[in-house]
Amino acid sequence: MEAFERKIWLSSPTMHGEELEYIKKAYETNWMSTVGENIDEVERQIAKKVGCNYAVALSCGTAALHLAVKLAGERLYGMPKPGKGTLQGHKVFCADMTFDATVNPIAYENGQAVFIDAEYDTWNMDPAALEKAFEIYPDVRLVVLVHLYGTPAKIDEIKAVCEKHNALIIEDAAESLGATYKGQQTGIFGDYNAISFNGNKIITGSSGGMFLTDSKADAEKVRKWSTQSRENAPWYQHEEIGYNYRMSNVIAGVVRGQIPHLAEHIAQKKAIYERYKKGFQDLPVQMNPYSPESEPNFWLSCLLIDPQAMCKQVRGDSDAAYVKEPGKTCPTEILETLAKYNAEGRPIWKPMHLQPIYRMNPFITANGNGRAKSNAYIAGEKPLDVGADIFSRGLCLPSDNKMTEDEQDKVIEIVKSCFA
């Protein structure tokens, strides 16, 4: 089998032409800064699409999450002392299976993340583990929820736990724009919500993100903070810490040109997922799952190898090794083989509780304090650390919506060859 003539990407931007027209308009009208028609329209269109009252266009999804955390901390604990974040040392429950952009804003605001294990039905935060966390830390009042790879979490169950314990929710919908839960778009279920337009997302601005809310006051506060907290004065007046987080009118032009193609991109991504599912039906693997109550945006198609089909694999902080066994494979072998043929895959997000920077943070499983538990299987059935198990056995497949069916068929054959 020969290598692909062109690179098969994990998920690259898909441009359509309208983006260039809006960028050109920003250039020709000289609105190149952080105000302009493109920004106004992107905010209006996304708010309408998602179903919220207000959207604030920001430089990235991380900026949206940071200001969401800052808002929540101020609401819960009041204005901080000079030099202190709004969380002021308080703990925050956060999804463990995620990219660290979800978690870092908690540290920005001087809080401590407590990581909540995943569950197998959606690979998202386990409501049972969240309930256990409240038993251990009953004073926590903030939960950061993530929809991994565009698959909605068990929103109703998680909201019920949070309401029981009087906790606010920040919804990190960075990967799930266009996904729905019980017919409603993700990005509206939290007290504060964030989405991303990063370069590999379902629609992109090359960068950019948004804060979503139904609260006019919260939207105005985020808008103010994101423009260096300038006061309403004839000169530059600053009475609180601010940030240079506003989206540029040029980036907004790219996003504006992408918005009409969201449904098209989702349909293409779903077709890729379904072709993989059919192509792998005879292999000892599963695709990333989702609940019948939700419809993902299928941003990334992922594979989970059955435990009995895993060859021996070990991973350090920056490298991995495996022992080839007949009829078995592992994520490391599959990813190395894809790369050999000029195709890009990716490991599953390494759980936050395994990251060197956060290894000392508490980690809670459905069985209690995960730090005190083994990752071994219980009676050969279920591991005590679900996130670590998914990371060990899972990988993200090439999911680029410009990949042809023939190219995807070849990816499928490459994966199958690893089980030979």
Image (cartoon, helix red, strand yellow):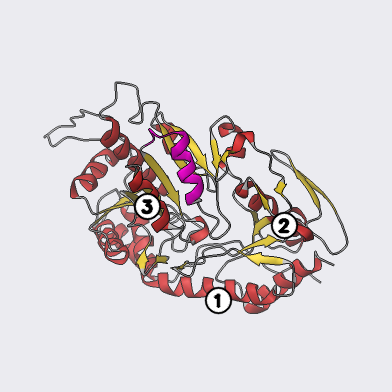
Query: Which residue occupies 43% across, 54% down?
Result: 174
Disc on the earlier residue, 1 or 3:
3
- Label 2 vs label 1: CA separation? 22 Å
Question: Counting other residues with Cα less than 10 Å from the Cα at mark 2, is it few (<14), some (14-19), or many (20 or more)?
Answer: many
Question: Counting other residues with Cα less than 10 Å from the Cα at mark 1, is it few (<14), some (14-19), or many (20 or more)?
Answer: some
**Circle 2 sits in a helix, a strand or a loop, which is it?**
helix
**Circle 1 sits in a helix, a strand or a loop, which is it?**
helix
**Circle 3 sits in a helix, a strand or a loop, which is it?**
helix
**Residue 369 coordinates in the image, percent (x, y):** 57, 36
Between 336 and 382, the one nearer to me in the picture: 382
User: Which residue is the site of mark 3?
Assistant: 159
Question: Counting other residues with Cα less than 10 Å from the Cα at mark 3, is it few (<14), some (14-19), or many (20 or more)?
Answer: some
User: Which residue is the site of mark 1?
Assistant: 271
**Residue 349 coordinates in the image, percent (x, y):** 59, 49
| Residue that extends furthest to the left in the rendered view of this protein | 234
Between 159 and 3, the one nearer to me in the picture: 159
Residue 228 visible in rendering:
no
Query: Which residue occupies 48% across, 70% down?
Result: 292
* Three-letter code, disc 3: Lys
- Quadrant placement of the N terminus: bottom right
Name the side, left or right, on which 70 lies relative to 392: left
Between 162 and 47, the one nearer to me in the picture: 162
Q: Is residue 255 above or below residue 66?
A: below
| Residue that extends furthest to the right in the rendered view of this protein | 326
> Comparing marks 1 and 3, which lies closer to the viewer?
3
Which region shows up in magenta? 127-140
| Residue 326 counted in the magenta span | no
User: Which residue is the site of mark 2?
Assistant: 335
